């Protein structure tokens, strides 16, 4: 049923995108990795900074990082933190929760590409914190 529901929404997506530019023909199996300039935790910071500037570059760097780090705890932790700090609607939270939980359920051959592609909908570190974070920090005196 979910597969059919997904297929039924594709024409609606294509119709909504008319007039907004071309929907890119990007294939997940052809995404090429590009190594981040930094390494370790700094590479994760670099990737999430790129999310706000160039999502395709962030996806390519994510793929390279994930291929080098078979247990992407730092990457997943950073993505979760940024969703809480930068997320603005329920879709942000639901999407990231599903993606980050499903990573370990996928076959090893697809895990890295799946998670790398998710950066197109994750939040980058260069975005403004959401209003709730600002209010919470002000209330705690840590603003």
Image (cartoon, grey):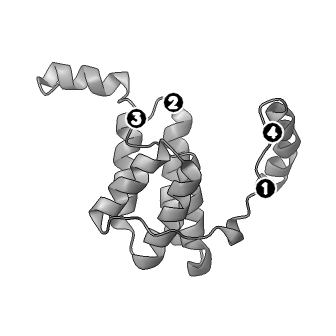
Seen from the viewer's position, the closer of residues 95 and 22 is 22
Disc 2 secondary structure class: loop
Q: How far apart are marks 3 and 1 (CA)?
A: 28 Å
Residue receiving disc 4 = 13
Q: Nearer the viewer, mark 1 or mark 2?
A: 1
| Marker disc for residue 25 | 1
Residue 107 position within the rendered picture, expressed as x and y whole percent measured from the top left: 60, 78
- Residues packed near mark 3 inside 10 Å, few (<14), some (14 to 19) or many (20 plus): many
Q: Which residue lies furthest to the left in this view?
A: 141
Real-space CA distance between mark 1 and mark 4, rounded to the nearest whole angstrom: 14 Å
Q: Which residue is drawn at 78% across and 45% down?
A: 23
Q: In the image, residue 79 lies at what x, y percent?
A: 40, 51
Foreground of the two, 101 or 122: 122
Q: For the residues carrying marks 3 and 2, which lies nearer the camera in this image?
A: 3
Sequence order check, earlier mark of 4 and 2: 4
Q: Is residue 77 in view?
A: no
Judging by the rendered image, the residue that carries numbered circle 3 is: 86
- Taking 54 as reference, is 114 above or below it? below
Q: Which numbered disc, 1 or 2, marks the residue that appears first in the sequence?
A: 1
Q: Do the residues labelled 1 and 2 touch (CB within 8 Å)?
A: no
Residue closer to the observer: 34 or 124: 34
Which of labels 1 and 4 is toward the front?
A: 1
Q: Earlier in the sequence, mark 1 or mark 4?
A: 4
């Amino acid at each position: 049923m979910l597969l059919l529901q997904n297929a039924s929404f594709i024409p609606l997506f294509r119709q909504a995108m008319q007039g907004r530019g071309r929907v890119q023909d990007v294939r997940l199996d052809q995404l090429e990795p590009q190594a981040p300039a930094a390494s370790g935790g700094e590479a994760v910071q670099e990737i999430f900074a790129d999310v706000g500037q160039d999502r395709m570059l962030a996806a390519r760097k994510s793929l390279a990082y994930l291929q080098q780090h078979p247990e992407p705890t730092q990457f997943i932790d950073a993505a979760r933190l940024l969703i809480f700090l930068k997320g603005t609607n329920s879709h942000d939270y639901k999407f990231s929760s599903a993606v980050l939980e499903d990573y370990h359920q996928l076959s090893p051959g697809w895990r890295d590409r799946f998670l790398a592609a998710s950066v197109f909908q994750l939040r980058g570190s260069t975005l403004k914190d959401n209003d709730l974070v600002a209010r919470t920090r002000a209330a705690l005196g840590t603003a």
